[in-house]
Image (cartoon, rainbow, N blue to C red):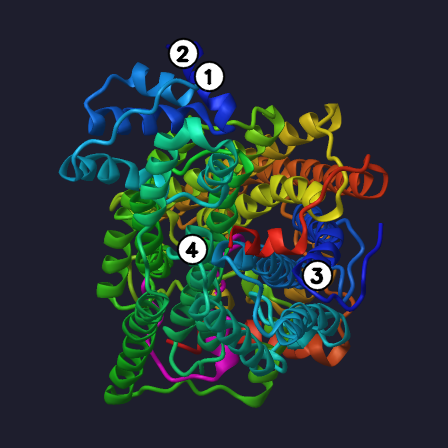
């Protein structure tokens, strides 16, 4: 196995990234577990500037939603963009440097968080590097646009469409996060828009990009309908950025924007239905009969679908006041992130033979891991949803009865309803950490010790073989 | 029929479903049965092409299927070239499919995506955010004024990320103390604004200084440094690692809640 530190083309670069990706996922799962442990047992665990729930929450956001996200984004763009545009990436050295810079700056943010914890913002990013990050994402977007303009395929494949959408909204989210806080409502404006553009749109678009690639190329199936794919694309692009405001229902946000958010969230049913039909019809023509591969894709799809359903449920007028400012939003935020991690696993399994020329064998370990991952993720989302509804219901019921459960002794009632689910989440977090470790193990085992098979050539990766 | 289909699929190296659809399209265009078409592809005689007008229909039907993500169709294309003569008819259908690939302009697509992004940025964020600031500017008594000590305490609160569990949204001035709309839209320091929080896991702290026991400095000091000794049923972090001055600032800030931001 040879990995070049300075890659010459997409294949070399993909080699480096695919090798490191499972390790970044493992890091993210570890910090997430540590955070959950300090949430449930903060009064008994030893605390300091770093080991406390407040800091670990910010660190977890930085690692999962920024470092890991940018890593996955760059890997996906490097491999899928050239493949779906039918040509090698133009100005590759610059592309390589920008991608590396983007991952590097997110990593520096992680390091800076330890050196100067007060610099780290609530949802990740340090204020000092935000401007440089904006410039890098802008440059990365510019290079992607140049490649789009120089495409050789007559049509624009769905994978590349979603990638472009993800990068555009990544840039928008960073611009939003740099805005000034002047009045009280700015807290909700800035953070809800950042969450919906960076996490909802960003994670789901990278997910959909990999998803469309895997259900066609990976499953060796024929896409049922490009039109339905296009409906999903434009639907999500227009609707998702507006869906975050409803979780701040009843706050100082203007009523009209809360209402628009509710109606547009309900409309998510349209792109979701288009996606479901396209998936089920496409998958019916699959030639790849590997069950573990299909199971992993199905779990990722179920988690993504479930997250969308939660978005729709939370826009029902009776439910909205209950779920605002609760863990319900956590389910949605992590739902998009988890679906991305779940789809990443079959993507990496699919790429190992292509990139490294090593056979990937789906054994018992991979089968067990697929079910472990899927069930732990779905259970975590369900428990967060339950906590959200329990908290909201308790607060509202308490307020109506004249005995507020939002604060003071009354809060003990709320806590009695949500403490057990939190303990279960900690256990599930451990299972998730274990499964990411198994994923790392499977990948590295295949890369290092897998039997030699035929890998893709550079021209095949870039799609030049079609000419 | 299915055996024949499988045989043709094997010869072509293409998925059976694709072969089936192509055969149906060819059959409809040529006026023959699907079986005859398959027979010809399997090595029998090629079906004669029908009139150009009739060719239109299958192309329309196949077009949807052809705009695929990546390989399946491309694989067929390669195989067909290799298989040569007996597959003449199939080759022709595939060629038609390739020709019919819809051309999409990158420029229009990019403009569309950027257009939606700009629209979202301005109409969901920039304009309403500015409108809120304008509304506050026009109102009387529109500023939150706090002392330097309180501000330093607010900074400690923010650095510890207390706002990841505690909100400061519920105000007593308004009888409805549900999840609450409540915080008046005033100009304030950035840290004061951020401390209002986004998600509530622990109690709301907006009026904590007006209630027992959180209005008691000694109780609060003990709770912040050794929470289990005061209340062991709810896990709360211990901030015994804070310097004395930072802890004092934090206490000052917490004891001011309920007086500011109203």
Q: Which residue is mark 4?
A: A325
The disc at residue A13 is 3
Left or right of A152 on screen, residue B255: right
Element under label 3? helix
Left or right of A125 on screen, residue A202: left
Q: Quadrant of residue B58?
A: top left
Q: Are marks 3 and 4 on the same chain?
A: yes
Q: Are marks 3 and 1 on the same chain?
A: no
Instruction: Determine contact: label 3, label 4, CB under 8 Å.
Output: no
Q: Residue at x 38, y 32 (%)?
A: B88
What stretch of residues is rendered in magenta?
Answer: B181-205
- Residue A81 in the image, given as x and y percentages of width and height: 53, 59
Q: Give the Cα distance between marks 1 and 2.
A: 6 Å
Q: Nearer the viewer, residue A289 or A209?
A: A289
Chain label for disc 3:
A
Instruction: Determine contact: label 3, label 2, CB under 8 Å.
Output: no
- Residue A300 in the image, given as x and y percentages of width and height: 52, 38
Q: Which residue is mark 1?
A: B6
């Amino acid at each position: 196995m040879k990995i070049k530190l300075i890659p010459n083309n997409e294949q070399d670069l993909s080699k480096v990234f695919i090798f490191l990706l499972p390790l970044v996922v493992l890091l993210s799962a570890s910090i997430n577990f540590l955070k959950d442990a300090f949430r449930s047992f903060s009064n008994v665990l030893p605390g300091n500037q770093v080991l406390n729930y407040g800091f670990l929450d910010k660190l977890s956001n930085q690692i999962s939603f920024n470092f890991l996200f940018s890593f996955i984004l760059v890997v996906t763009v490097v491999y899928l963009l050239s493949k779906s545009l039918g040509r090698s990436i133009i100005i590759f050295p610059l592309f390589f440097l920008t991608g590396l810079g983007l991952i590097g700056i997110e990593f520096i943010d992680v390091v800076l968080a330890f050196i100067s914890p007060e610099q780290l913002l609530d949802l990740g990013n340090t204020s000092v590097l935000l401007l440089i990050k904006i410039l890098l994402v802008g440059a990365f977007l510019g290079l992607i646009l140049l490649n789009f303009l120089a495409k050789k395929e007559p049509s624009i494949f769905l994978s590349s469409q979603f990638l472009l959408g993800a990068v555009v909204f990544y840039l928008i989210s960073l611009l939003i996060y740099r805005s000034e806080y002047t009045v009280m409502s700015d807290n909700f404006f800035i953070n809800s828009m950042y969450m919906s553009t960076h996490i909802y749109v960003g994670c789901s678009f990278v997910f959909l990009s990999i998803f469309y690639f895997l259900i066609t190329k990976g499953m060796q199936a024929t896409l049922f309908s490009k039109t339905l794919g296009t409906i999903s694309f434009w639907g999500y692009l227009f609707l998702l950025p507006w869906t975050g405001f409803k979780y701040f229902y009843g706050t100082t946000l203007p009523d009209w924007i809360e209402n628009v958010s509710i109606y547009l969230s309900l409309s998510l049913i349209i792109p979701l239905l288009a996606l479901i039909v396209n998936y089920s019809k496409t998958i019916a023509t699959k030639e790849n009969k590997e069950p573990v591969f299909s199971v992993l894709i199905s779990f990722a799809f179920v988690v993504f679908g479930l997250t969308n359903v939660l978005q729709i449920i939370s826009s029902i007028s009776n439910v909205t006041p209950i779920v605002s400012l609760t863990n319900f939003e956590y389910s949605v935020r992590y739902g998009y992130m988890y679906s991305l991690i779940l789809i990443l696993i079959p993507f990496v399994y699919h790429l190992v033979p292509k990139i490294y020329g090593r056979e990937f064998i789906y054994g018992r370990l991979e089968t067990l891991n697929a079910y472990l991952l899927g069930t732990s993720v779905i259970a975590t989302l369900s428990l967060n949803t339950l906590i959200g509804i329990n908290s909201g219901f308790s607060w509202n019921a308490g307020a109506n009865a004249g005995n507020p459960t939002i604060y003071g002794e009354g809060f003990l009632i709320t806590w009695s309803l949500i403490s057990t689910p939190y303990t279960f989440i900690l256990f599930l977090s451990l299972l998730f950490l274990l499964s990411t470790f198994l994923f790392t193990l499977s990948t590295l085992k295949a890369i290092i010790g897998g039997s030699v098979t035929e890998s893709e050539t550079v021209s095949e990766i870039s799609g030049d073989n079609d000419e | 029929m299915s055996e024949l289909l499988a045989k043709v699929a094997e010869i072509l190296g293409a998925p059976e479903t694709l072969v089936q659809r192509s055969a149906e399209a060819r059959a409809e265009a040529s006026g023959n049965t699907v079986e005859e078409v398959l027979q010809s592809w399997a090595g029998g005689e090629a079906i004669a092409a029908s009139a150009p007008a009739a060719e239109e229909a299958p192309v329309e039907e196949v077009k949807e299927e052809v705009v695929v993500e990546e390989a399946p169709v491309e694989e067929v294309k390669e195989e067909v070239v290799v298989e040569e003569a007996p597959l003449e008819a199939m080759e022709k259908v595939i060629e038609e499919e390739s020709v019919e690939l819809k051309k999409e302009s990158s420029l229009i697509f990019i403009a569309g995506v950027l257009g939606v992004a700009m629209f979202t940025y301005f109409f969901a964020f920039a304009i309403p955010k500015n409108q809120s600031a304008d509304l506050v500017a026009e109102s009387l008594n529109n500023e939150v004024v706090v002392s330097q000590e309180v501000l330093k305490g607010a900074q400690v609160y923010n650095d510890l990320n207390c706002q990841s569990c505690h909100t400061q949204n519920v105000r007593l001035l308004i009888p409805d103390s549900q999840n609450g709309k409540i915080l008046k839209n005033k100009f304030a320091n950035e840290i004061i604004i951020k401390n209002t929080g986004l998600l509530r896991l622990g109690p709301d702290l907006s009026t904590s200084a007006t209630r027992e026991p959180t209005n008691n400095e000694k109780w609060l000091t003990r709770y912040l440094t050794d929470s289990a000794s005061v209340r062991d049923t709810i896990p709360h972090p211990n901030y015994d690692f804070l310097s004395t001055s930072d802890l004092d600032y934090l206490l000052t800030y917490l004891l001011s809640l309920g007086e500011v931001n109203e």
